[in-house]
Amino acid sequence: MKGQTYIEEIADHVGQEVLIRGWLYNLRSSGKIHFLLVRDGTGVMQAVIVKNDVPKEVFELARRLTQESSIKIRGTVRADPRAPGGYELSVTGLELVQLAEQEYPIALKEHGAGFLLDQRHLWIRTPRQAAILRVRHEVMQAVRDFFNRRGFIATEAPILTPTAVEGTTTLFAVNYFDDKAYLTQSGQLYLEATAMALGRVYWIGPTFRAERSKTRKHLTEFWMAEAEAAYFDHEDNLRLQEELVRYIVARAVERRHKELEQLERDIELLKSEIERPFARITYAEALEILKEKGRKIEWGKDFGAPEEEALGDHFGRPVFVEALPAEIKAFYMQPLPDDPKLVLAADLIGPEGYGELIGGSQRIHDLQLLEERLEQFGLPRKPYEWYLDLRRYGSVPHSGFGLGIERTVAWICGLRHVREAIPFPRQLYRLTP
């Protein structure tokens, strides 16, 4: 018998004796037989202990096990279509690593969301939450593979910054020795600098928004996959975004099909949403569509969750909303050549009510225009002098975007709330565990 075998690879060991190291998820007994559900982080399988087939102390030890006790279990693998996952372990040996306390805080019964979030450190052990986190892993790895294969260089951006990226009203301020700093809203400005050195760059990192929002689509700390590319215009930018989203979804469906089925995700619907080219409409066209649906929005106002949901439902697939009003977007966005009131930016709205998945734009590359925009937005010039240097020394047209990891995971998994799409969510009034 070799060393530890993982449950996810158990199908390769039918008829063999294996060692599983994990935790007891559930135990039920029927006279002279114990049925143990054992999890090891890669999956859950049933182990059967027959009283007459094992030493007495093994059978008695199994009887005393409590939920989440850590154990090592040996046995022979056999196929059984009735068992979870289609395989079962006929136990020959059992070793206790640690006996969990008798009252497990989240025993196998229904609990409210608030209680489960208080116990998030334990909640993530359940099969559903573990499946979501495995899909999240696949999404993150898909992003990395996508950019690496296209010649983008992985880089980093600082978490502590002296400046705002997405406006000053959603900044978390922190004391930085004798100065003031902020938790980053985006790595974009620094990625722009790195793109001028390396051509095409990306990173996946945490971002922070001090928004007093309690909606199912908002977190105060979330992760973004961001990319910046020199000599990319608006069309290049949108093409790259669409290719990225298609790749991520197709990759998740292919490699995490089991987890998506476990989550009862409508996989055929998800696949259909990326089969056709993504829709593209202007902000003005979006207003007309919303008006027809009874949602009249004043020109120059940003869309809220109901409007984004209505647009996603209208097309049944992701939709780019472009030619956005400059007054509701960030200071660094390139104006349309024929209408400076609009910018070469787009928000990618997801279907099924998942809202904005990506925000991106072509960036202003003209020094004078960028200086004017800083003044118009009432931003102090000094903290942005280094950013202005990028326009003084070898400025070129360039573009970039940021994709929200949690919203993307929520869409792919079919989650109602993004709080399940991150291991430890940070929300308004929630800082623990």
Image: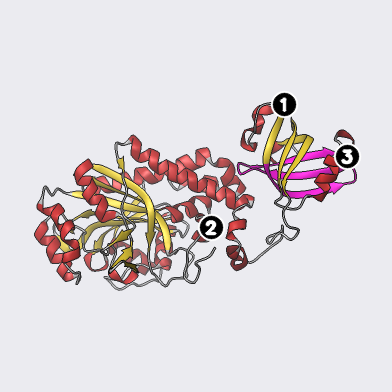
> How many numbered marks are there?
3
Q: Which residues lie in the magenta part?
A: 22-50
Q: CA distance from mark 3 to mark 1?
A: 23 Å
Quarter of the image with the C terminus in it: bottom right
- Outermost residue on the front side: it is 177
- Tell me residue 163's x, y (percent): 25, 64
The residue identified by callout 2 is 420
Q: CA distance from mark 2 to mark 1?
A: 37 Å
Residue beneath the point at 35% across and 72% down: 296
Q: Quadrant of residue 73?
A: top right
Q: Nearer the viewer, residue 229 or 351?
A: 229
Residue beneath the point at 39% across and 41% down: 144
Magenta-colored segment: predominant secondary structure: strand
Residue 376 as seen in the image, left or right of residue 151: left
Q: Mark 3 or mark 1: name the one nearer the start of the chain.
A: 1
Identified by mark 2, the residue type is Glu
Q: Indicate which disc residue 56 carries.
A: 3
Q: Indicate which disc residue 16 carries.
A: 1
The image shows residue 404, relative to residue 327, as above or below, that is above
Give the mark toward the camera: 2 or 1. Answer: 1
Residue 384 as seen in the image, left or right of residue 129: left
Identified by mark 3, the residue type is Lys
Query: Which structural element holds mark 1?
Result: loop
